[in-house]
Amino acid sequence: MDSQNIKVAVDPVVFGYENGSLFILLIKQKYGPMKGKWVLPGGFVKDNEPLSVAVARELKEETNVTVDYLEQLFTFGDDVNRDPRGHIISIAYLGLANPKQLDIQANTDASDVNWFEINKLPQLPFDHNQIIKKGLERLQSKVHYKPIGFDLLGDEFVFSDLENLYRTILQKEIDRRNFRKKILSFGLLEETGELRKTGSGRPGAVYRFNKRKYSQLESSGFHFDIKFA
Amino acid sequence: MDSQNIKVAVDPVVFGYENGSLFILLIKQKYGPMKGKWVLPGGFVKDNEPLSVAVARELKEETNVTVDYLEQLFTFGDDVNRDPRGHIISIAYLGLANPKQLDIQANTDASDVNWFEINKLPQLPFDHNQIIKKGLERLQSKVHYKPIGFDLLGDEFVFSDLENLYRTILQKEIDRRNFRKKILSFGLLEETGELRKTGSGRPGAVYRFNKRKYSQLESSGFHFDIKFA
DNA sequence: ACCTATTGCGTAAATTTGACACATATGGAT
DNA sequence: ATCCATATGTGTCAAATTTACGCAATAGGT
């Protein structure tokens, strides 16, 4: 087996949250067989390049984005014809970011970049819709047992932001009061002392997620875990 | 990027359970740079071969084993020097089987096959120890929320078999009575009517796991879930 | 002053978990 | 047989957690 003809790509599924909606970062292809189509901002891995480096690079090159959270999602390689260019497998990654803190910019292979609302996605080429579906499933299940939701919010937020984030991700009603109690019981949020006026109604306290404390607790056996009614 | 020089391999981590111990299936390499060493029974993916087909093929070729449970585990490709032969990434799979029901036999690239107890593993080449570690972690976390433990047992078993399986996998004491109640509450086990004498002590009822029923329940929102004291 | 909207805090029933006690059914030893 | 050690089958109850709400507090608008 010395002349294997399989190519290796990486594809990041980057989620963004804003204003009650989940978005995904897509680029419009400048070259290639899918020129002019919107696709995930991935690309081929270089020789002697670690996979995680490759995704971060492609993401940066094509969208100008660097995300804080990036984890391996799944490797797509069961459909041998997923790419018309030949036998190409793709290692998909799940990324989380706060759109407000990013300056997206099309580069290299991309003629355009944009955030697309998750339930208003265009028909994507390859198996990219399937990859995104897998990403969403992972996000939905993982917010139950890891505090990754905070990576979708800004550093500072009011409680209703967090509530609405969970509602949006899980597409499910949750009880405001029980949710608050549960989250606060972990002792991972700290008040900044400020209040934020939301327009009408009583202003809410502004919180910050204490990531450092979470790391400590986690390594000493603590387990972030939320259930919903 | 038309002359990418990365090779793609698959490596199954097949767990077997017997008599209170967890085992892993390894082969002794017949050729290659690690000739004579014990390694995971994997190999290179063929052109136009789906990944899942490739793992099953390698497993069958090298060990004569076909497993019922096989899921994608993780893709190892961050250490560019994980294989001395060059830049090779490996898609690892987690497999579960009942050793008693298998007839292992060395073939093709393997000069020998054997089950190795999980905590008495030899030093393996490449990053195979790391891959196995990842497999064990996945198994340990997944038995909590999916009934995959049954794939490690025979079709028929007594309750203490199941208890001991969980004790072995989780390396943790569990309360026999609470465990039984929890498992039975799912209504997924059916009695065969027979009793099995375990040597000394009261004989236990023989059970079967109703896989069909589980599929039904799962698709209608049921969620297998066990906690331990 | 009054109404609406949103936040903050609390209480109680229902359910689940965790820690046990005890009866039942075998094999082996006396 | 009788007694003992061993393992299985069933039940009970307190503690902890989850779930479903009620209601006061603080803001904007009329």
Image (spheres, coloured by chain):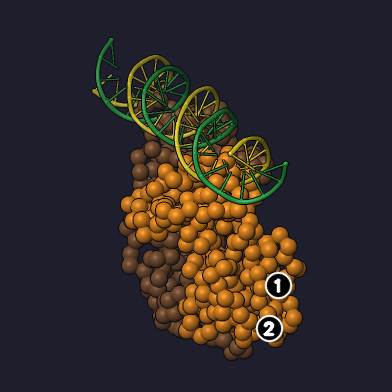
Chain colours: A brown, B orange, C green, D yellow
User: Can you see residue B113?
Assistant: yes
Q: Are marks 1 and 2 in contact (CB under 8 Å)?
A: no
Q: Which quarter of the image is occupied by the N terminus of chain B?
A: bottom right
Q: Is residue A149 above or below residue D15?
A: below
Along the viewing direction, whichever of A195 and B18 lies nearer the viewer:
B18
Q: Position of residue C30 (x, y in %)?
A: 72, 41
Are there few (<14), some (14-19), or many (20+) residues within 10 Å of tag 1? some
Earlier-in-chain disc, 1 versus 2:
2
Marks 1 and 2 on same chain:
yes
Which quadrant holds residue A114?
Answer: bottom left
Q: Position of residue A113 (x, y in %)?
A: 44, 63
User: Can you see residue A68?
Assistant: no
Secondary structure type for disc 1: loop
In percent of the image, x 43 and y 76: which residue is there? A79
Residue position for label 1: B126
In the visual, does D22 lie left or right of B64?
A: left
Along the viewing direction, whichever of B81 and B112 lies nearer the viewer:
B112
In percent of the image, x 49 and y 74: which residue is there? B52
Q: Which quarter of the image is occupied by the C terminus of chain B?
A: top right
Which quadrant holds residue B9?
Answer: bottom right
Q: Which label sits on residue B90? A: none
In percent of the image, x 40 and y 66: which residue is there? A130
- Kind of residue sitting beneath label 2: Ser
Residue position for label 2: B111
Are there few (<14), some (14-19), or many (20+) residues within 10 Å of tag 2? some
Inter-mark Cα distance, 1 to 2: 19 Å
Q: Position of residue B56 (x, y in %)?
A: 52, 76
- Kind of residue sitting beneath label 1: Phe
